[in-house]
Image (cartoon, helix red, strand yellow):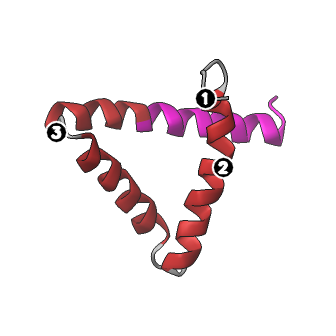
């Protein structure tokens, strides 16, 4: 049986897989990266809009970015 943290990670990986599938669909609809980026950010705000202030949502996004940048920076010349 999976531990709670293993279950959380499995849940996250399912959500990530779905998000990447949606990204592929979005690329087929619009070649403009800015349109896709903005749409994805709108989705984050829509996810939280009834529970959190917009400034708080922005802080959540920034926090996630702070976590992801080191991960995606590995192996690049920008380190």
* In the depicted structure, whether residue 9 falls above or below residue 44: above
Percent of width and height locating residue 15: 52, 39
Q: Earlier in the sequence, mark 1 or mark 2?
A: 2
Measure how far apart labels 3 and 1 are at the Cα level: 29 Å
* In the depicted structure, whether residue 51 falls above or below residue 59: below
- Residue identifier under label 1: 78
Residue 62, located in which quarter of the rendered image?
bottom right
Percent of width and height locating residue 10: 66, 33
Q: Nearer the viewer, mark 3 or mark 2?
A: 2
Q: Quadrant for the C terminus, please.
A: top right
Dot 3, how many residues are within 10 Å of its Cα: few (below 14), some (14-19), or many (20+)?
A: few
Residue 46, located in which quarter of the rendered image?
bottom left
Q: Are marks 1 and 2 in contact (CB under 8 Å)?
A: no
Tell me where the magenta segment starts and ends, as one range. 1-19
- Residue identifier under label 3: 30
Q: Magenta includes 42?
A: no
């Amino acid at each position: 049986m999976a531990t709670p943290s293993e279950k959380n990670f499995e849940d996250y990986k399912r959500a990530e897989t779905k998000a990447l599938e949606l990204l592929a669909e979005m690329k087929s609809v619009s070649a403009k990266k800015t349109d896709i980026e903005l749409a994805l950010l709108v989705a984050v705000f829509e996810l939280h809009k009834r529970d959190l202030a917009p400034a708080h949502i922005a802080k959540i996004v920034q926090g996630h970015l702070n976590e992801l940048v080191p991960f995606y920076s590995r192996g690049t010349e920008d380190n």
